Amino acid sequence: MTPPTQLFGRWATAAIWLTLPFTAGTAFGDALDPRSRGVQVVATVALWVLWLAGLVAALVPSTVSLTVARTLAPASLAAAAWAAVVVPDGADAPEAVALGATALVAVVALSAPVGDRFVNGSSYGDERRMPLRPPGALLLGPIEVTWLVVVAGATAGPLLLATRQWVLGAVALVVGWALALGGVRLLHRLSQRWLVFVPAGVVVVDRLALTDALLVVRQRVDSLGPAPADTTATDLTVGALGLALELRLTEPETIIPAPRRTGADRGAAQPVEVRAVLVAPSRPGWALEEARRRRLLVS
């Protein structure tokens, strides 16, 4: 990864997020202007709290911050889209600016350089974490639905209470926040999936694929490279799309795959011996570059 890319990953989200009160504040004010006083106060306080939480997350990179940023940044775009729809005619310019700024921060927060920098904010010593791509099946709806549950669950209760719908608001607050907490935990699991390079060797950390992390000491790493089409390596990509890397071993290692959630053998997790495994880093080229830097054979 080049220094400009590292700089982008470290500061781009914070720089754009910092501008949102100026680029999107007017649009949110226009959208809230015809609402009741209670809704205005609750929504305004919530927007400032979420903006502050997003700014702290952007300035303090970690795996937790990555989950927060990747939840709040798209939420800001959704809020700007709502403002553009409900704002009175004649105020198009502020809404267009808000849509542009929030769309930009959402794209940046979801980018590979940001993911790489943030997960390494929680790394230890001479350790380099490479985020793994999410399962392809989750990209086709489950991730988006989970995110929607988090955002709707966190906001519905306070807004209903602001409109004096006490019973419905109280129910939505309790149920919605419980669902939001569960959804955040599920989304956070996607931020905790890595191919890790350490002085001792290579580690695959992925609770979606493995019960326990797979550590291959460097003496047992045969090579790392793009997987051939006819590979017989054990697939740990959990269906991720794109190029997979094949980590070949000099001696067999024992792994315990994550329990299956469907099928006749649901819940079963039996040890398996492997001589090679497939992984899917978000940027395979960066992983190969790091392998070369650590003097591992790249095929």
Image (cartoon, helix red, strand yellow):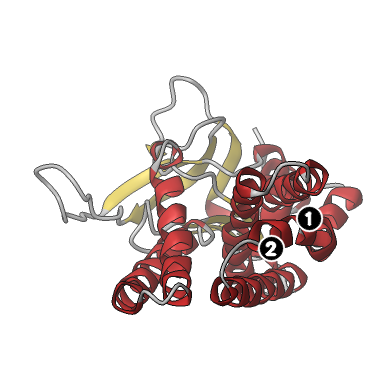
Q: Amino acid at mark 2?
A: Phe
Residue ID at (84%, 49%) = 5
Height in image: 24 above or below 95? below
Residue 133 lies left or right of residue 125; in this view the side is left
Residue 185 position by quadrant: bottom left
Indicate the position of residue 101 as horizontal and vertical percent values.
78, 49
Q: Is residue 117 visible?
A: no
Q: Which residue is mark 1?
A: 9
Q: From the viewer's perspective, tell me whether residue 170 is left or right of residue 282.
A: left
Residue at horizontal 34%, vertical 55%? 255
Coordinates of residue 47 in the picture (x, y in percent): 65, 70
Estimate the spatial distance between the alpha carbons at disc 2 and disc 1, rounded to whole Å.
8 Å
213, 161: nearer the viewer = 161
Q: Which residue is mark 2?
A: 118
Query: Can residue 40 be seen?
Result: yes
Q: Secondary structure at mark 2?
A: helix
Give the percent coordinates (x, y) of residue 277. 44, 42
Q: Position of residue 155 (x, y in %)?
A: 48, 67
Residue contact between numbered discs 2 and 1, judged by CB atoms under 8 Å: yes
User: Which of 153/185 is in front?
Assistant: 153
- Choose top left, top right, bottom left or bottom right for residue 32: bottom right
In this view, the residue farthest toward the top is 229
Total residue callouts: 2
Q: Earlier in the sequence, mark 2 or mark 1?
A: 1
Q: Label 1: few (<14), some or many (≥20) within 10 Å?
A: many
121 vs 245: above or below: below
User: Which quadrant: the C terminus?
Assistant: top right
**Closest to the observer: 227 or 117?**
117
| Other residues around mark 2 within 10 Å, as few (<14) / some (14–19) / many (≥20) | many
x 65%, y 73%: residue:
44
Query: In the structure shown, which secondary structural element does the residue marked by tag 1 occupy?
Result: helix
Q: What's the residue type where badge 1 is placed?
A: Gly
